[in-house]
Image: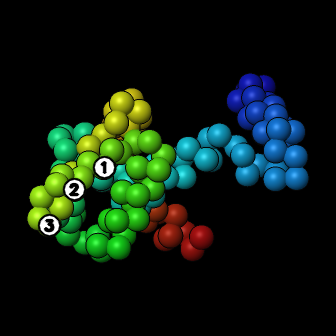
Amino acid sequence: MDARPANLRTKLEIYRADSGDAGLANCPIRDVIQTISGRWSSLLMMALAEKPYRFGELRRLVPDISQRMLTQTLHDLQRDGYVNREVFPTKPPGVEYSLTDLGRSMFEPLHMLLQWAEMNHRAVREARSAFDADGN
């Protein structure tokens, strides 16, 4: 028998026991992955892994993101410690975003997942089409 389900079961039981009435609300995997898996987070992390960017540069780089969503996503990434926000005393104030050490360490495995997604995108789309054609 595969050990992974039992391992997952054991981990989930530990998370439940540690959380009391909160159930799996304190699951560390869910807690950490929630922000990283956001619609725009991986793109912004990818950009910031290249170099620091100002807000306007990020907005132009990802033109289909709204200003509100860009602000919220950057705020969430900053809150989790992945992104640093630096304000420059200019008029108007300039703001630059960059990855923190934690953000760079998280980006390494995220980058592997992004590469996998690029390499397997066609296969995933074909699987979806086949599934949908079967009437599922």
Q: Which residue is mark 2?
A: 95
Which residue is denoted by mark 1 in the rendering? 85
Is disc 1 in contact with disc 3, using a CB cutoff of under 8 Å?
no
Find the distance from the CA under tag 3 to the CA under tag 2: 9 Å
Q: Residue at x 41, y 58 (%)?
A: 75
Return the x and y of residue 34 as percentages of the image width and height.
Answer: 54, 52
- Which of the two residues, 76 or 37, is positioned nearer the viewer here? 76
Amino acid type at mark 1: Arg
Q: Residues within 10 Å of mark 1 (few under 14, many from 20)?
A: some
Q: Position of residue 130 (x, y in %)?
A: 47, 63
Label 3 belongs to which residue? 92
Question: 76 left or right of 87?
Answer: right
Q: At label 2, which amino acid type do we have? A: Val
Is 127 in front, or is 107?
A: 107
Numbered disc in front, either 1 or 3: 3
* Residue 11 visible somewhere in the drawing: yes
- At horizontal 54% and vertical 46% (from top left) the residue drawn is 33
